[in-house]
Amino acid sequence: MASMRDIKRRKSSITSTQQITKAMKLVSTVKLQKARNRAEQTDPYFNYMYRTVKSILSQSGNISHPYLLAGESAKKAVVVITSNRGLAGGYNSNVVKLITESGMAKEDLDIYAVGGKGADNLERRGYHIVENASQIIENPTYPDASELCRKVLTAYADGEVGEIYLAYTHFKNTVSHEPQLIRLLPVEIDDDGEEEDSNILMNYEPNAEEALDTIIPKYVTSLFYGALVEAVASENGARMQAMDSATSNAEDMISDLTLKYNRARQGSITQELTEIIAGANAIS
Amino acid sequence: MADANRIFKVEIITPDRVFFTGEADFIEFTTEVGEIGVYKEHIPLTTVLAPGVVSIHNSGETKIAAVHAGFAEILGDKVTLLAEIAEWPDEIDLGRAEAAKERAEERIRSHAAEVDIKRAEFALRKALIRIDVKEAR
């Protein structure tokens, strides 16, 4: 059995770790609140964008627009959104796993990384990182998103990549976040059958194709921005959960160690008594 | 003079927030192909916004704002502006706009190879709009 002093030392070290995890949990709770509000505020913009793009595509029928057809290059650009800091449970590794288990060949991927953890991890595995824009995850703004988007779209327009994917963590609610890999370009709009406003004949200025030209990059950027904001919310949610369970694990360990400590104390007292009594017996 | 039949809904949405939602009897803004004024029962139209001033008129009151880049969806009884950036006059920092204007002019004048003229012109337009909106108040 470990000595009393060892147990005591270990207990105090766990207590101080517990204090840290508790504090981190509080911090990420506050950050989560903020990030969630932001994520909610981008929703109307995105929904409108989605609806408009969808209605343009459904009305304009078969335009052969470069944004709607896969490029010739076999290469794929993947934007990977993770965090810069760890201690968030499986948050970062789940996103990385999406890529490694997607069945896409390593050589075909150009990674645009947002978030240092994902970038490091993928680089170690031998993926090709084209761009590391990790600082923007700290406080994503729309101009940041459009800047990165411009780079990816330029690569697409130049024919360097044929498809664009986005890997991020979708924020469902505080306790549930889901890593997702979605295709941005060529655009795929799922026909979910609801033909709203179909009786309105929309006009486009200058014309449908040119409108698509400007609207699709904006659509992609808005997806991008939405993903960044959601990823921040998910990161903090994941960290909050991780720190919560770390705190309760520490609690368990402390109570276990307290029990052991008390046992060791009792044992040592009993031993001392036995020794004294034995000594007294020997004298008399 | 604003009668209820001429009122329609106006929404201006940016990525960060719902910038404006309310009613109007007339709205003006700038598109890629020129300025446009919209009354109720306009034909359905989707158009690309150019940096410019949006004025929302409602019963003789006029609100103006600066809007940069985006597009507008006009339906008979509703106008939605999806803008990347939208600002009320009191959110604009005149000093910053002036500085941005000078910087952009400088870049355009320099004719250096590494200068992206299109971007500089766009920046100049944004700065000019901001100054316009600020001073129109």
Image (tube, coloured by chain):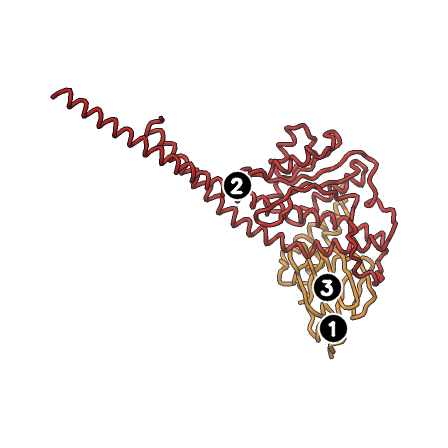
Chain colours: A red, B orange
- Mark 2 chain: A
Residue A203 lies in what quarter of the image? bottom right
The local crowd at label 2, few if under 14, some if 14 to 19, many if 20 or more residues have their Cα within 10 Å, is some
Question: Which sits in the foreground, A107 or B67?
Answer: A107
**Dot 2 amino acid type:** Ala
Question: Which sits in the foreground, B38 or A21?
Answer: A21
Above or below for A75 versus A39: above
For residue A242, the mark is: 2
The local crowd at label 1, few if under 14, some if 14 to 19, many if 20 or more residues have their Cα within 10 Å, is many
For residue B7, the mark is: 1
Expressed as whole percent of the image width and height from the top left, the position of residue B74 reads: 78, 63
Do labels 1 and 3 touch, CB within 8 Å?
A: no
Disc 1 with disc 3 on a shared chain:
yes
Expressed as whole percent of the image width and height from the top left, the position of residue A79 reads: 69, 39
Q: Which residue is mark 3?
A: B54
Expressed as whole percent of the image width and height from the top left, the position of residue A67 reads: 81, 45
**Dot 1 amino acid type:** Ile
Left or right: A235 as drawn, with respect to A211: left
